[in-house]
Image: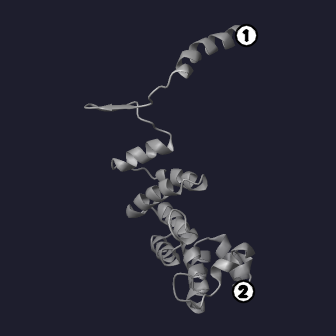
Amino acid sequence: MLKPLTLIIATIAAPAAAQEIESHVSDAYGTHNPEELSLRGALDRLRHGEWHPMTSALGYGAAKAGMHEMAREIFTDSAARGNVQGITWLSWMEDNGLAGPENPEAAAMWDRKAMELGSEVATFNYGLDVLRGRGVPLDQAYGEQIIRQAAAMGDTSAQHLIDNDFDLDSVTPDADEWKYEQRLF
């Protein structure tokens, strides 16, 4: 029973697979059959002024797939719209030098902005920035205050840091220690 069905499907699919099919066509009347659930479709809509909160999630996928320029475009637009997730991911890109040089000052600025918008994750991240002196002046007392604020908001990593007497090694891998060393140059 399955063999005839498989043969029918193969017969129908073969001509479509044998020729390249344009997924969308634009003309004077607009775009016909636009991509909907793809990164390219999200970028097309973004470039035409359309945006959805889930756009940042697509940016995350792009960043993790190594498509950093596309991710940066999505996160930059999301940040301009005040989207906390987009701001947080843009900070991550700045901090790690993805689609541009490493920029701790910009990363800390984005963390602070997302913190001001009420993000507990960004509050924790900005507290770490201050405790490390990364992108902002090092200030132990202020950094601890921010971390306590993040914990009060429900951030479990912040509470873990407090429980470990603000030992930064308790929340960050030692593989990143080089990044947080105080540089004298």
The residue tagged 1 is: 3
SS at circle 2: loop
Q: Residue at x 53, y 63 (%)?
A: 89
Residue 50 visible in the current orientation? no
The one nearer the camera, 130 or 135, is 135
SS at circle 1: helix
Which tag, 1 or 2, sits closer to the chain's start? 1
Q: Position of residue 125 (x, y in %)?
A: 58, 74
Q: Residue at x 43, y 61 (%)?
A: 76
The one nearer the camera, 156 or 52, is 52
Q: What amino acid type should be assigned to the residue bearing mark 2?
A: Asp
Residue 93 visible in the current orientation? yes
Q: Which residue of the protein is positioned furthest toward the left in this rendering?
A: 28
Q: Position of residue 31 (x, y in %)?
A: 34, 33
For the C terminus, which image quadrant? bottom right
Q: What amino acid type should be assigned to the residue bearing mark 1?
A: Lys
Crowding at label 1, few (<14), some or many (≥20) Cα neighbours within 10 Å?
few
Task: Give the alpha-carbon distance from disc 1 to disc 2, as whole Å.
Answer: 67 Å
The number of numbered discs placed on residues in the rendered structure image is 2
Q: Residue at x 51, y 62 (%)?
A: 99
Crowding at label 2, few (<14), some or many (≥20) Cα neighbours within 10 Å?
few
The residue tagged 2 is: 165
Q: Nearer the viewer, mark 1 or mark 2?
A: 1
